[in-house]
Image (cartoon, coloured by chain):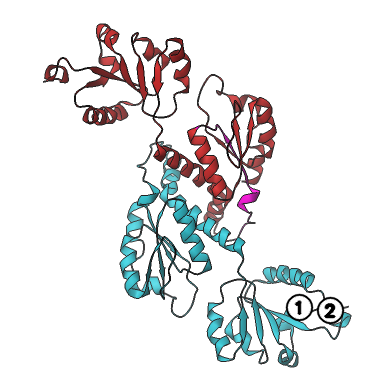
Chain colours: A red, B cyan
Amino acid sequence: MTDTQKNPTSRIVPLLSSESTEVNARTLDALRIALPRERVCLLEELSARECVAIDVCIGANPTPEMLHRLPNLVWLQSLWAGVERLIEPARARKLQVVRLIDPELSRAMSEAALTWTLYLHRRMPHYAQQQREQNWQPLPWRRAMDTRVTVLGLGELGSACAHRLQENGFRVFGWSRSQRKLAGITCYHGMAGLETVLPQTDILIALLPLTAQTRYLLCRRYQLCARCGDRY
Amino acid sequence: MTDTQKNPTSRIVPLLSSESTEVNARTLDALRIALPRERVCLLEELSARECVAIDVCIGANPTPEMLHRLPNLVWLQSLWAGVERLIEPARARKLQVVRLIDPELSRAMSEAALTWTLYLHRRMPHYAQQQREQNWQPLPWRRAMDTRVTVLGLGELGSACAHRLQENGFRVFGWSRSQRKLAGITCYHGMAGLETVLPQTDILIALLPLTAQTRYLLCRRYQLCARCGDRY
């Protein structure tokens, strides 16, 4: 018996996903437990007629093209916070995009940023190399307050990372495309701000959404990490 | 002209050191700038007669045997905090041992403990291995609050490490030979406490002084990291 046969009048809530088959299978399993009265399926399983009836869907990094298949959609529930590439198409048709702000995701991301920053700051690649050479020489140590870390992108994740790094003693700068303020952190914005902050940066963390404005932002204009390369 | 010739009546302040020739040379340079009116030299440069006159010395991890050469010593200024192996010989002869508590040293040590804890917690050795194999598979992620870190030794450095790890979300336990209390951290003590805390530990950090009581403490009695070895 298929889901449709079990409850033919249940609302269809499609999952619009760019993820792998394996991830989709896990996501669908979890959604079906959370939404036992709805029929949750992948967008590609729906007929054109079914698509016209859809008003609510769930997004796992959907493409704008997927949205075009659902002309009467009023609510897209994103499974995470990054929804930047949907903002333009949604605004054009008055579609509500609802994103999920998960404090655990911010914690995990700021922990990752801290982990890799400490990895470079404490010269772990150098020590690993020395270990392979059986060389046990201590390398010069520097204070965290003398290591300058710049976070590009000051949304939920970028802000959490900037604060976490600052709490752990690093000298932190923030950068965003439009002006943002973070308590206790020197923030720059726009292309002029980027030109100012990059030469002062030892470690650079990119937490920008991938949009037409940010794609190739760094590669196009800067010889990235020229200074970092010298030091680490 | 030697230092002694420059000022033959200056007080001699010997450096008692177990460090390398290179480290001693740097230490002596710095001490001579800080103490321009004293004659600062290595203990081994002094005659037996000069040794008898010494009342103040500076210690860089001196051995108890070095102290025996200075029968009239009243003040030993240690260059750092760890002075445990001098406590017994000093007490026997009413010698004052003065140690240096440097907040920067606590910060650097707690940063090192955090760096290596994150390194294991975020499975960086596994990812490095996968990278060598060109395998880009994400590994299961766990929350810091589910990683249990035990700090052995709750002196200046151990306490700083325990608090730093807790501030960064880890579940932290402390252990010391005699009972100690740290705000917000579950502390154990004595051999019974060690037996209790080790089986609950994912990552173990040893910040114990090297004394007769702590030498071989772990090797003798425990198959260390049996659990960690499974996971990391």
The stretch drawn in magenta includes residue B160 = no
Q: Residue B195 placed where, x, y %?
A: 31, 70
Q: Residue at x 41, y 61 (%)?
A: B185
Q: Is residue A205 above or below residue B227?
A: above
Mark 2 and mark 1 in contact? Answer it, CB < 8 Å: yes
Q: Which mark is residue B85?
A: none
Residue at left offset 41%, top offset 41%: B130
Local SS, label 2: helix
> What percent of the width, then of the height, locates residue A24?
30, 27
Label 2 – label 1 distance at C-alpha? 9 Å
**Most foreground residue, A170 or A91:** A91
Residue where numbered disc 1 is placed: B40
Q: Which residue is mark 2?
A: B3
Say which label, 2 or 1, has the lower sequence index.
2
Q: Secondary structure at mark 1?
A: strand
Residue range of the region highlighted in magenta in the rendering: A137-155
Image position, residue B228 (x, y; %): 36, 57
